[in-house]
Each structure stands twice: as C-alpha cells, then as structure tokens.
Amino acid sequence: MITLFVAFLVSLLVALVLTWRVRERALAWGWLDQANSSRKVHVRPIPRLGGIGIVGGFFAPLCALFIVDSGVGAQFLAQTELIVGLFVGGAIIAGLGFYDDLKGAGAKLKFSVQFAVALGLYALGFRIEVLANPFGAELTLGLLSLPLTVLWVVGVINALNLIDGLDGLAGGVAFFGVGTHFLLALMRGDVLLCLLMVALAGAILGFLVFNFNPASIFMGDTGSMFLGFVLAAVSIKTSSKSGTAVALLVPVMALGLPIMDTLLAMVRRSLLGRPLFSADKEHIHHRLMSRLLLSHRTTVLVLYALCTLFMLTALGLHFANSMQSALLLSGIGVVIMVLMRKLGYLDMRHMDAVQQTRQRNQELRSLVRSVTAAVRAAGSFQEVWSAVRPLSQGLGLSALELRLRRPHDDVGGGVVFESQQPDAGAATALEVRLDVKEAEVLFGALRLVWRDGRSAIDRDEELALEVVADAVAERVAQLVALEAAAPERIIALRR
C-alpha cells in the first residue's frame, strides 16, 4: 500500500510540474488552441499540449520501478508483455497525439497508427476472447477475438478524444474509469493493476489542477488519445481476469459516457450525411448546455454525476449474478433513454429536415471533393483560383475572394483574385474569412460573403471550407517551394 501511495504522489507531482512548464512554454512559443471555429466553446486562445504532463506523470513512477527494489517492482518487471505494451504502445500513441497537436494529422494517419498499435497489443496477449451474455451462456469469440480487440482499442482511444470538448471533462471521465478499474483490481488483490491505476489517477489529477473550468491549458490529442489507450489496454486485462458472467460489460460500463457519446455521434453524422469523423457541436455536453441552459462548469459536474452512476453500475455488475445483471442493465438503459429524450436525440418530428440536411451535405461533400482535387492539381496561383471559383455558385455566395502571398512578400504584397455575384441577394452581408495557413506559415486568406439573409455560417459549410482552405494552403506551399527550387518554371503574379 505504501508503494501505491508513493506512486500516486510521484505521478501527481510530476504531472503538476510538467503541465505548468508546458503551459508556460506554450504561451511563449504560440502553441495555442485558437477560438476560430463555431464548435469551440472557449472564447480566447488557450495553450495546448497539456497531455505531456499526463504522459510524464504516468510513466514517472513506473520508470522508478526499474531502479527501486520493491516487491511490486519485481512483479512489474516480471510482466514483460505488459511493460512493452504500455511503454511502446503508449509512447507511439502519445507521439501521434503530439504530432497532431502541432502539425495536424489526417484521419488516415491516425487510424493507421492506432490499428498498428492495437495489433501489437493483441500480439502481446492483450486479447478479448470471451463475450459476456448476462442473459445466458458466455460466447467464446475464437477468430473474432482479433477484430473485436482491435476495434475496442481504437474505439476507446477515439471515444476519449471525441469527448474532450469542455474544461476538465475528458480528464474527469478518465478519472472515473480509472477509479472503477482500481477498485476492481483492489478487490481481486491485483497489485500491479492497482499500481497502474494510481499512477494514471495522479497524472490526471495533476493535470486537472490547470484544466478544470476555467482551464488555463488543454490536454490536446496527446493527452486524450493516451488516456484512451491506457484505459483500453487495462480494460482488456480487467475483463480477462474477471470471474463474473459479465466480463467485458464491466469496462464498457466504466467508460459508458464516452462510448455512448461516440455511438450517438456516429449515428447522427451518418443520418445527416456528414463525414463520420468531422467535428460538430451536438455532443452530449453541447446539448446539456444549449437545451438545458446549463453553465460550462455545471455541465461538467452533471456529467461527472453520470459517470459516477456508470461507475457504480460497473461495480455492481462485477458482483451480480445473471438476473441481477439484467436488472442493472435494464435500469441504466432506462436512465440513458430518458437522458437522450431530454436532450432531443429521440425527437422524430424533424425527420424531413434531417433528410433535407443529408441531401444538402452530400452535395456539399461532392463539391468539396471536386474543388480540392482541382486545387491539388493546380500548377500556379491562377489555377488555384480557378479551382476554388466553383464555391461561389455552389454556396450561393455574393462575393468570393482569394488572397495569396509568398512568405517573403510584404504584408500588402501578393495577388488578389475576386468574383462577384450581383444577383446573390441584397440583404445585410455576412462575411467569413479563413486563413490559408500551412504549418503556422500564412499564405493568404479566403474571404466569402453571403447576402441571403443569414446571420451565421452553417456548421457543415464551415467544415467544408476548412477542408478547402487546408487544401489551398498545402498546394500553395508546394508551389512556393517549387518556385524557390526552379523559379523559371513559375510565372509570378503580382497585384
């Protein structure tokens, strides 16, 4: 027990110091999460990369076990597969999150790395081999063990990432999951899993000192994906050592909130014709704030209470027989249905509007695909502009403007392309500007004007324009690099 307390204290202190230092460096170096999107809840730039404190806090006491001679340390060093899985897999996932926070990683890269790490865990013995059935005999998975294990690891990693939308929410949700696994391991006398959980609990609490509302730093993908990875790996160990009839249902219930939010997001985006991994402002925490008019902090506390309910249900499932498990699951199911109804997820009165939105989004995605493909094939600034111009008609714009400049041009230098649609309406103008930026280098801006009476940009259109702006920035950066290497191949355009 002393070893557990020391591990908790070490992880807490390391996380506190690291998070504080990262916050100071992030402010100095401009590593900030900008409030430049309608889905952002914060209204000012906030330092990111706070997940470094969580990663460092978790690994610090575990690394100490390689040096300090103790009984727990001996057990830990004897678990080679566990060490390799957590250290190597955790480092890779944290590195992926760090890269995404700094440079931005596409969905293909993220999933490629996550699936590779999940396969590595499976090879090391982290396997879901039995699927619980509280209403009957358990199911042995056989060949389905591999895909289910991989999907579980990747799913939990992204579930924690998706729910990271309010100050202190992802960290708090992870803390309740950690608490559940700690109590289960303590009841079984599994000292090693207890050690892992107290190390992660200390790291989370050290970070939450700076992240609880009002947050002074965000964990970013570095922290959220790392938390998801550790919880996914530990959940597999917890389920494999469970002697109850519910096995995997216990860790599923322990992470009930992020799993429920992820499933709702997938169904919602599929119905509306949105990309499955696009961002929106319809998560559970967003709807609590908008529909129940709760404050930022109150919303987080309400979700903490919901996590507590999931935690108690998970612990109850661990001790319950089949009949009791069925009653517990039925009870939590009723709570979930009431919550979803209260938040409007089960409202069927707007299905016609949903179908119209789906059709419009499919047309919008088709437009974005054609525009970005043309942008990536452009051989000059003029061709980039020609590729972007279809946005004017496709989005019903009154005016479209693209400003492009080389990094060494004067502030007022570069070239300006513009098109006008006189018949696009006469209402008060709504103007939207998106920076054309690649790796913090500003190459210009995309300016769009509507005169159709709208007062704010549609979220789906905003997402589409962000994709276009990113494609333009990527291609312009390539053209600038090509011009520097072979200037005779580029025709310079000036104002």
Image: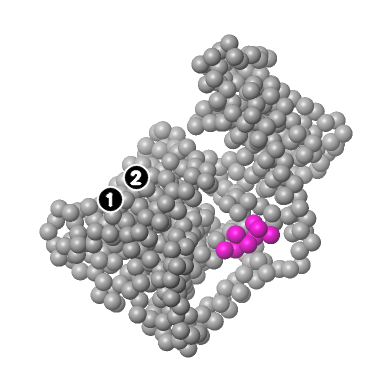
Three-letter amino acid code at the position of disc 1: Val
Asked whether residue 269 is drawn in magenta, I would say: yes
The amino acid type, in three-letter code, at marker 2 is: Trp
Image position of 190 with respect to 376: above or below: below
Image quadrant of residue 404? top right
Residue 136 x %, y %: 48, 85
Does the magenta-highlighted stretch encompass residue 174? no
Kindly report which numbered mark, 2 or 1, lies closer to the viewer in this rendering: 1
Q: Observer-nearest residue: 473 or 166? A: 473
Q: Can you name the residue that lies furthest to the bottom here? A: 323
In the rendering, which numbered label is found on residue 20? 2
What residue is rendered at 55% in x and 61% in y?
A: 262
Using the rendered image of the protein, determine whether residue 492 is visible from the camera's viewpoint: yes
- 284 vs 105: above or below: below
Q: Alpha-carbon neighbours of circle 1 within 10 Å: few (<14), some, or many (≥20)?
A: many
Which region shows up in magenta? 263-271
The residues bearing labels 2 and 1 have C-alpha atoms spaced at a distance of 10 Å
Horizontal relation, residue 78 to residue 23: left or right: left
